Image: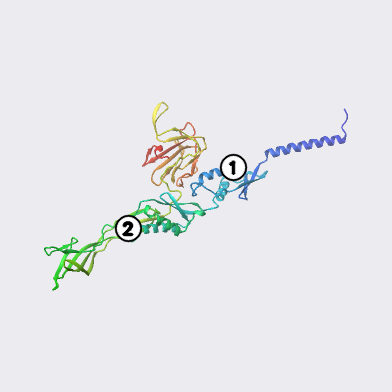
Amino acid sequence: MKKPSALDIIKYAAVIVLFALTVGFVVSVSTADAAFRLFIDGEYIGVVSSADDVYEARARLASDIGGIAYGTELAGCKITYGSVMGRAASEKLSEDEIYKALYVAELKDFSAAYGVYVNGEFIGANESAETVYDVVSSARKAAQGEAAGEVELVGSIEVKTLYYPYETLRSGVEMSNELTARSDSIFRTVAPSKSLVTGYVDAWNDDDEIFLAMPGSEIVSTDVSEDGSITVTVKIESAISYSIEYEKTSDLYVGEYEKKCDGKDGSKETVCRITYENGVAVSNELISETVLSEPTAKVIYEGTKVKPITASTGIYDWPIKARYTITDTYGYRRIDGSTKFHYAVDLATSSGVPIYAADGGVVTFAGRTPSYGYHVIIRHDSGQETLYAHMRVLPCVKAGERVYQGQQIGEVGMTGYATGPHLHFEIRINGEKVDPLDYLP
């Protein structure tokens, strides 16, 4: 065998080194921590692992945004990517950071404001809670007019704290004019209990006696002049109608009214001198008027508190938005050879599917028990409760926290007594479990 020359040895060494470098590069590339630079509307945000992370955050935002923004049309931010290699995982954006960046971008043309809804129809929004209250109050006063009667709410007025597109913002004057134009469909004026006395004596009758128009009247004196005219002095006790007063309270929402106390009429004594000619009253002179008792005003609370996003709507929504199958309903069923009553509706779907609050309210329980597994109980403003059981992991809300309708509170699982991933959903009224299907749309 020919002994390799020094040149051959160098060639072989070069090939080996090149091969080693090539293998090392391939290994390095295959094990590199690939990532992407994220740009939103041309602004560099940070590094993400993949476009899927951004897609998932955007899908979550689209689900949540309906509960915090008026309407469904968002800004439609533009997302672009730039390649980058070898970034450490610690330098990448977290899921919440991606969500927050998208949240800000999608709501860039929105403003936090107070929207007014009349009979369910959106009228406009204003960034001042005080202005919104004044708008509703002025509409109520316009409906009352000069009458002393009480104004009742026959329609509905609701104020929601949300994000509204700038083009939906209205001035106080614009919104006030809109509500005033609709006052007939919102308010009704109730006439006061009594009206003031306008006359006391009717006329002479054939027997030359006086008909008194009001009970409690008393003839003080009667004089007949030479020309045949008759002057009658009359004393009468009459009512002083009570007034209606509205008192602001932050315990009620804007558009809500509640009686604080009843009103009470006062009384007065009036003395007047009436002159008759040919049986017809030609003059009525007031001699004196004495207040016997002052009237007490009827006071009505008028709400000033803006309804928060977490306030209950009073209408339940389905707690799962993904595809599901109703596998069990409210009523009797066979389990382990025996008949038992099932107090809920079961919605079977994939493990990890988000669970949403059926309505806004306060979380009264968020934890785990042997039968329900991980579950959440929400008490709504009406006092009703909803329960969401068999969650996959610990709920993403805590006891005492207020949640809004459509806010994610957990994920579908099968903890507790469950044979497969599903949501066990209950509605409780006055502590009694009722059929959820009677209350869901």
Q: CA distance from mark 1 to mark 2?
A: 57 Å
Residue at position x 46%, y 54% in the image: 124
Q: Which class describes the residues within 10 Å of circle 1: few (<14), some (14-19), or many (20+)? A: some
Q: Amino acid at mark 2?
A: Val
Q: Assign the N terminus to one quadrant of the image.
A: top right
Colour convention: rainbow
Q: Residue 282, located in which quarter of the rendered image?
A: bottom left
Residue at position x 35%, y 51% in the image: 154
Asked whether, in this view, residue 308 is left or right of residue 14, the answer is left
Q: Amino acid at mark 1?
A: Asp
- Which of the two residues, 117 or 103, is positioned nearer the viewer here? 117
Q: Name above or below for residue 391 compared with residue 181.
A: above
Q: Name above or below for residue 80 compared with residue 266.
A: above
- Which of the two residues, 371 or 272, is positioned nearer the viewer here? 272
**Furthest residue to the bottom?**
226
x and y, in percent, of residue 266 in the image = 25, 61
x and y, in percent, of residue 224 in the image = 13, 71
- Which of the two residues, 127 or 149, is positioned nearer the viewer here? 149
Q: Mark 1 or mark 2: name the one nearer the start of the chain.
A: 1
Q: Which class describes the residues within 10 Å of circle 2: few (<14), some (14-19), or many (20+)? A: some
Q: Residue 34, located in which quarter of the rendered image?
A: top right
**Furthest residue to the front?**
278
Q: Assign the C terminus to one quadrant of the image.
A: top left
Helix or strand or loop: what does disc 2 sit on?
strand
Q: Residue 89, located in which quarter of the rendered image?
A: top right
**Furthest residue to the left?**
207
> Which numbered disc covers residue 53?
1
x and y, in percent, of residue 116 in the image = 44, 53
x and y, in percent, of residue 298 in the image = 30, 58
Question: Label 2, on which residue?
Answer: 299
Helix or strand or loop: what does disc 1 sit on?
helix
